[in-house]
């Protein structure tokens, strides 16, 4: 499957389905059909509308949709999304609330590079904007990155995070959501060793697979069932001629989406059938619950092949992070070097992707950190999405994370040099 023809074939199928939906919607919407009160025509128009929107969203990067913010003064302030660090595979962006005083908390929100755009954290960003300066890692779609920009694997990802942390400085509070948690922990440890004055104040890891074998799930078991050769042969393709990254090896977003949907096929099928009926009855709207969810869920991005394969092999199969054997640019990273960054883990009791036990393993790796700097929380009844964007996040987890940040807001005491006896 490692051919441009396969990639272009998938894009052709997507494009054809979008065209079929558009054609059905247009034909069934001719005014002349109104003289024939046939519900089949209304259903055809509804099917076309839902189908066209569904396949169109698969190649569109969603907008953040955060344009204004109401501050304590009762006025609406514009929110400007500024790129403060620009790199080939991802930028660091800042949500600047115009006319508002700089907030005391600076938060670096590390978004996953796992098929969806950083906009998946939209509600998380909005909840933190209330009283925080929010920065987000905005990863690029690999199909749009020329081959001349080189590779991007988990070591490059870790080095990117270190650069972002250095830029923001030691008053930063890092919050890593899901997939980047292990690499964010490694970046913090590496920074603590190489440039301790630049390491962040706190590190919060939310639902990440620090030790995938602590409590195996279907996701972690998949990494065990297949060989790296099988993954490379079945999942990796070359970007087709339509995009700037032509020839780049990627794990295509459309292929990832097929995997996502297959995990809960019956539920998604019912959701789309119900939406078609709502549209045919005139009960749907452009921003109803279905469209709000699926506009984001269906928007997928290609992942660099080397990043995907190295994640599966080194994080899940070899458990390099869990065994404290992770190497970056030829240097072994020691998690025990974290001695003054307060670390908190958050897990969901019903998380079926990164089950409870996988993330809290980070605290055992931080052997150089006193217990007073460690914290953990397991949210009862919360699934994977809920621990960073749902009701559990809004009502329980967010206040706990901000309280943890405030508890460790005081500048760390300078470390005394050890006195040796000759």
Image (cartoon, helix red, strand yellow):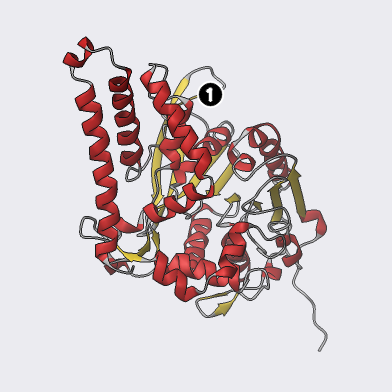
Q: Residue at x 56, y 79 (%)?
A: 331
User: Residue 68 lies in what quarter of the image?
Assistant: top left
Q: Quadrant of the C terminus?
A: bottom right
For this orientation, the residue located farthest to the top is 35
Q: Residue at x 29, y 31 (%)?
A: 48
Q: Of residues 417 and 226, which is closer to you in this image?
A: 226
Q: In this figure, which residue is indicated by the disc labeled 1?
A: 71
Q: Residue at x 16, y 14 (%)?
A: 32
Image spot of residue 55 (x, y percent): 33, 41
On the picture, is 330 further left or further right than 67? right
For this orientation, the residue located farthest to the bottom is 422
Mark 1 surroundings: few (<14), some (14-19) or many (≥20) residues within 10 A:
some
Whether residue 156 can be seen here: no
Q: Is residue 259 above or below residue 388?
A: below
Image spot of residue 20 (x, y percent): 24, 38
Q: Of residues 165 and 332, which is closer to you in this image?
A: 332
Q: Is residue 312 above or below residue 18?
A: below
Image spot of residue 194 (x, y percent): 58, 71
On the picture, is 32 further left or further right than 1? left
């Amino acid at each position: 499957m490692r051919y441009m023809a396969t990639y272009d074939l998938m894009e052709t199928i997507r494009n054809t389905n979008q065209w079929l939906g558009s054609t059905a919607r247009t034909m069934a919407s001719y005014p002349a059909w109104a003289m024939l009160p046939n519900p089949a025509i209304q259903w055809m128009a509804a099917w076309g509308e839902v189908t066209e929107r569904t396949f169109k969203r698969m190649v569109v990067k969603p907008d953040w949709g955060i344009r204004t913010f109401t501050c304590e003064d009762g006025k609406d302030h514009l929110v400007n999304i500024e790129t403060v660090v620009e790199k080939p595979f991802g930028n660091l962006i800042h949500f600047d609330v115009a006319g508002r005083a700089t907030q005391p908390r600076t938060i670096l929100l590390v978004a996953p590079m796992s098929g969806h755009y950083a906009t998946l954290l939209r509600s998380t960003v909005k909840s933190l904007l209330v009283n925080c300066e929010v920065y987000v890692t905005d990863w690029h779609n690999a199909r749009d990155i020329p081959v001349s920009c080189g590779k991007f694997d988990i070591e490059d990802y870790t080095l990117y995070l270190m650069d972002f942390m250095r830029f923001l400085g030691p008053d930063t509070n890092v919050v890593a959501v899901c997939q980047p948690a292990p690499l964010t922990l490694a970046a913090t440890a590496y920074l603590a060793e190489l440039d301790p004055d630049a390491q962040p104040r706190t590190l919060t890891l939310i639902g990440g697979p620090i030790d995938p074998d602590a409590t195996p799930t279907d996701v972690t078991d998949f990494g065990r069932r297949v060989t790296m050769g099988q993954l490379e042969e079945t999942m990796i393709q070359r970007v087709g001629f339509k995009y700037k990254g032509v020839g780049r090896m990627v794990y295509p977003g459309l292929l990832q989406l097929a995997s996502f949907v297959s995990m809960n096929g019956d539920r998604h099928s019912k959701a789309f059938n119900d939406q078609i009926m709502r549209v045919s009855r005139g009960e749907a709207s452009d921003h109803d619950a279905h469209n709000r969810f699926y506009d984001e869920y269906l928007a997928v991005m290609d992942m660099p092949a080397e990043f995907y394969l190295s994640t599966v092999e080194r994080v899940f199969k070899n458990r390099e992070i869990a065994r404290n054997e992770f190497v970056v640019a030829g240097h072994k990273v020691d998690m025990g070097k974290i001695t003054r960054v307060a670390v908190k883990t958050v897990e969901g009791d019903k998380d079926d992707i990164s089950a409870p036990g996988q993330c809290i393993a980070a605290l055992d790796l931080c052997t150089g950190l006193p217990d007073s700097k460690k914290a953990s929380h397991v949210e009862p009844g919360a699934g994977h999405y809920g621990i960073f964007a749902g009701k559990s996040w809004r009502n329980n987890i967010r206040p706990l994370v901000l309280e943890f940040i405030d508890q460790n807001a005081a500048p760390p005491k300078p470390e005394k040099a050890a006195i040796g006896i000759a």
